[in-house]
Amino acid sequence: MRTFAILFQVALMLSLPTTLALAIAASNSTSKCLPSDETCFPPKSSFDELSDSLPTADVIYPSLSRYKSWSDATALHNQRLEKSEHTPYCAVRARSSSDVMLVVKFCAENNLLLSIKSTGHCYSGNCVQQDSVLLDLSLMNDISYSSSDSSITLQPGSNFDALYALNEETQTQSVGGMCGTVGPVGFSLGGGHGPLIRSYGLGTDQIISVDLVTAAGELVTVTKASDPDLFWALQGGGGGSFGVVTSITLRTHPAPPNLTSYVCNYPLSLDSDDNTGDSGVATASMWWSDIMPRLPNEWTFFSVLLPAPIPLEQNIPEFDKNTMQGLLSLEGLFNGDFASAEASLSELGLLDLDKSRQMSCKFENHTSLKAWHESRWFGKTPVPTRNYMSTSFAQKNFDGKGLAKVAVDAILSTDNTMSSFFGIQTGGAVSSTDSTSTSISSAFRNSDMLMEIDANWIRSANDDAQESWTHNVGRDVAALDNMAGAYVNEPDPELENWEETFWGSNFQRLQEIKSAVDPDAFFECWQCVHA
């Protein structure tokens, strides 16, 4: 759910590739009653009655008189998601569970399409559906700490900036992501990756309880003891399928006195002898195949390939744009002290990896996760762009050289300076949890790395080219030996067989639970669990 936070964060149907246009058309196919059907769609007076009944919210419409509220309610970070395909009929900016319950009951009774949006980081746009009633939860952003069990309870509108600030106040750590404006609720429901997952597990592994409004409009608290099946589904099944989450309680962990980071950069450039870019391939291959898999669990590394350093954020004086056509940046966080961090990297050979070509390599100490997060380029407030992404999980003993060749070739050949590969190291505590104890796929649980392929751009005229680049490169990565699955929170909307790709063998049980808790299939959205 984060990808290039500082620079980067569906287009008009006629501008989309044919397969993506068909996918979106399919996603808009629904048995719900839409505004175009006057025989079943409620009159505006019914919506007025709903608005009057809401304790702390109103029903709003896309009118100039309420433009700011409407704009905030429907705002999405991915600018590729054009308003012409993601404009709800109306919106409710809920401030309480009571608001949510009444909206769900109204929509269920009238067979209306409901969209559920929190912080607006749904990259495929399935949280704001055309002609739906939009339930905007961004104003429900309370967050609190319980000293009795060292847990944190937060609402869906809260974000990682708020969570990390509370962690610092309480001297705790939480499993969270890299982009500060992403919400922990949606992050955790879909899995949740970040800098502490190898120490403590995925975001979803931290869930203690979930407050959920069901399709019947009832507010229930779901725990492993109270409803083990639904709790299992909520741990990885993604948002939008089983109910409206109004709050979630997560476990925290004691914060160490210090954390240590390490960053080292390497140039990617066409080889003067055979023009294959092998020098960059060899470095990435050695890192992925030999060094990264042997790191202790306190380390989580991010492997980032870029056409050039990010302006104003990555200060790499040695980078020469005349002779270097790309950059491999290795950024790691050690959940502990400097001496142990340095010793582990020295022992495994990372400090000497391709030493003659290293650029701006350094260790840093940090007093908290918040301090580290704020010091990194991907921890800054994202500048909205048009975005398309594809993901795959690198399994144990994956083809590091093959992945390096695909990644380096793709970066050296793109004309988009905001394209990237972003690899998140997994393993460690992620893999210590059995793949059947939550609905997270075995491809995720057993992986060594999640590889994201990202295209970010500004102009809508470039939509076709950038979507095709990402989809095609993502397909090449997925075809490599020991690559499997995809991440539900960062989906390719054109992905085929997405049910099996996201959840593997767990999807059948997810369907069974969906049928049990939502027998009328009231909750529906694109690339979400369906009955």
Image (tube, rainbow, N blue to C red):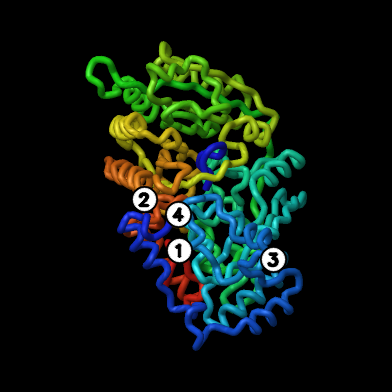
Residue 438 on image: x %, y %: 49, 57
Question: Mark 4: which amino acid?
Answer: Val
Label 1, label 3: how far apart the Cα atoms are: 34 Å
Secondary structure of the residue carrying tag 1 is: loop
Foreground mark, 1 or 2, reads 1
Foreground mark, 1 or 3, reads 3
Image-quadrant location for residue 314: top right
Is residue 222 in view? no
Q: Which residue is mark 2?
A: 485
Secondary structure of the residue carrying tag 2 is: loop
Q: Which residue is mark 1?
A: 528
Residue at x 57%, y 40% (from the top left corner): 178
- Which residue is the extreme one toward the front? 64
Residue 473 on image: x %, y %: 32, 42
Tally of numbered discs: 4
Residue at x 72%, y 67% (from the top left corner): 96
* Disc with the residue nearer the chain's start (1 vs 3): 3
Taking depth in this image into account, of 416 and 297 the one nearest to the observer is: 416
Above or below, comparing residue 82 to residue 344 in the picture: below
Secondary structure of the residue carrying tag 3 is: helix
